[in-house]
Amino acid sequence: MAAGGSGARSFLADAGYGEQELDANSALMELDKGLRSGKLGEQCEAVVRFPRLFQKYPFPILINSAFLKLADVFRVGNNFLRLCVLKVTQQSEKHLEKILNVDEFVKRIFSVIHSNDPVARAITLRMLGSMASIIPDRKNAHHSIRQSLDSHDNVEVEAAIFAASHFSAQSKDFAAGICNKIGEMIQGLATPVDLKLKLIPILQHMHHDAILASNSRQLLQQLVTSYPSTKMVIVTLHTFTLLAASSLVDIPKQIQLLLQYLKNDPRKAVKRLAIQDLKFLANKTPHTWNRDNIQALCECALQTPYDSLKLGMVSVLATLSDSISIKQYFSSPPGAIAGAARYSDLIKLAQECSYHSNRGIAAHGVTVLTNIVASCQDIDHLALEKDAVFGLESLLVLSSQDSSAGAQQTLKTALSCMVKLAKCRPYLSQSVVESLLTQLHSAQDSARIYLCHCLASVAMQLPVLGDGMLGDLVELYKVIGRSTTDKQQELLVALATVIFVASQKALSPEVKTVIKQQLGNVSNGWTVYRIARQASRMGNHDMARELYQSLLTQVASEHFYFWLNSLKEFSLAEQCLTQLQEDDIGLALSAIADSLKSYHKGIASLTAASTPMNPLSFQCEFVKLRIDLLQAFSQLICTCNSLKTSPPPAIAATIAMTSGNDLQRCGRISTQMKLSMEEFKNLATRYGDLYQSSFDADSATLRNLEIQQQSCLLISHTIEALILDPDSCR
């Protein structure tokens, strides 16, 4: 007993935290030991540990072996173990394609389909359905599903419906073969209504060819008229919508059908379903909406007395107003005399909703107005611009005083519209900024954070607004508060970011003093670090260097110390480069030399900050490329300057004629230019290699690497063009 208990504890420990120390094979062996245990509890625990194993070691060989072991458990185990294997398979669906021995795996699973136990057959059917992506055209699986649909056991029939839905989505042959049977079962009088409701959604997958989709649409059309009950109409309409969206055929007819139910059906549940599907189609295929569809939706929204339904309809219009359909709505049709009467309903609805008591409706109303102003140039904007600005300002006041989740979402919508309005109508930016700055003083801390983000976005688009914002922002920073809550710390970071954007890379000593004093009073080290990172991003390298310096004595690990020290040195290096001037070669070379000195100190600290678990390989390689790039620029400047300090000799033309090399007329600079050309070409190759190896980098980092690569190539090609034209070198 003691030995058995010790073995159990060892297995559980290894399957838990101790498993982190095991390699892939050892971890699989430990789980296999649990599978072969005589105790049901240990077997089940071993089974449920497999998703974690797949996540940690997503190797095809291991996954293939593991699934074969699970298939053996499924074949010989009881129904509870089979259910556990089913759940593991569903959780690890993305790893199924890595199974190498698919035939053997399916053979072990499929053997259970011949069991006399309907529950075992039901679990097997669900297992087959979960594996449909790797066995879409297995005829024996197709036959078993069709056979089980006629079973007298409800559990088995529901499992067959599950499998049929998954196989229909994956296999054209199965969908074509099962479509008629599904239709007969749905229309059959012997089929219970609850079973029909489960069978109807299978038809959404009948989109593999036009004939199949057409037959399914006809069946759904018959069902909508033949079964007018609420549940049946909802399920049928939703399936109809999904089928139309998948097949991309007759979507305009589906939109008309949904609008018809929205307008004429008195049941609120059906109306809500129609709105939900219209929103889905507005997101997926906005180009299929014509002028009449949008007009009908506007009329329904104007007439409905229910705020919940109006909210849904206006949200659909807000989605459409940000797409090409809004231009189609406002464009005059061929032969039309005037379109003002046609689009007055949309503007009227948006204006009414902008001041609605429901915040959600108001947010969608101003969104529609903003999108109309931004997209449509051929209508009178003056009144619409005023309505949009006034609506946004009122919504800003209401939502910034409330810290609830709904108010925060409304505030985000309003601020997004403000940024969009400032971008498309720059002359409105001043009033937008004034509204934001005014509200910034009285808003809740959570709202202030979003206001700061909006101010930063506007100032990035229009830097001229920064000077006017800076004074108010600094004054607010002085009195921002004395608490150390998370929201307060987040606000410190957001407000500092806006100040950095507004200052345009040149912070005055007074602003620096205000920021450092406030950080010393109420901030923690993490907040200071985040503000320093924002300063680096915005080009305020001097401020970033001072903040990194202040953090060096506040870390508990030498690796963190070296990391911060490297960032400090890099900030100092970039600060040196701000002294570059085009007309002073000596100052430029001195600035690059000082920058390289700091970069070499920084790369030494960065290397010391690396650990086996966090090697910082990308960071080190990127900094090395930056160092080599600066050295290449320094060499290029010296080369170009050598034409003045060491011009070609008087006999250069004679040497060129004797040697047959026309470049000799330029003297030694031609050789130096060739070396610079090769150096920049090599740098471009190295940037490209780093780009290719950084498969897990974010898009902004990859874009930066691509820009650096293209810049080096451009410089290399420019130097090559100069070399090919000797007169330009002279």
Image (cartoon, grey):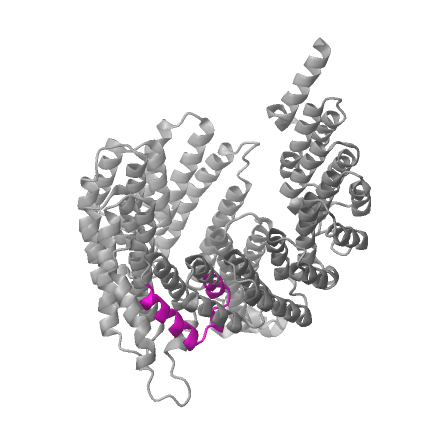
Q: Report the front residue among 165 and 599.
A: 165
Q: Position of residue 567 (x, y in %)?
A: 41, 39
Q: Is residue 284 magenta?
A: yes
Q: Residue at x 43, y 37 (%)?
A: 566
Q: Please, is residue 584 above or below residue 93 in the view? A: below
Q: Is residue 414 magenta?
A: no
Q: Is residue 448 above or below residue 185?
A: above
Image-quadrant location for residue 367: bottom left
Q: In x, y percent, where is residue 682?
A: 58, 56
Q: Is residue 652 visible?
A: no
Q: Does residue 234 appear anywhere in the picture?
A: yes
Query: Residue 392 vs residue 685: left or right?
Result: left
Is residue 255 shown left or right of residue 595? right
In front here: 347 or 217? 217
Magenta extent: 278-304
Q: Relative to the observer, which residue lies in front, 524 or 417?
A: 417
Q: Position of residue 602 (x, y in %)?
A: 44, 39
Q: Is 273 situated left or right of 380 in this image?
A: right
Q: Who is closer to the viewer here, 338 or 390?
A: 338
Quarter-wise, where is residue 516 in the image? top left
Q: Residue 269, relative to residue 26: is it above or below?
A: below
Left or right: residue 323 versus residue 110 is: left
Hey, which residue is sitting farthest front in the picture? 189
Residue 585 position in % (x across, y down): 37, 57
**Residue found farthest to the top:** 2
Q: Main secondary structure of the magenta part?
A: helix
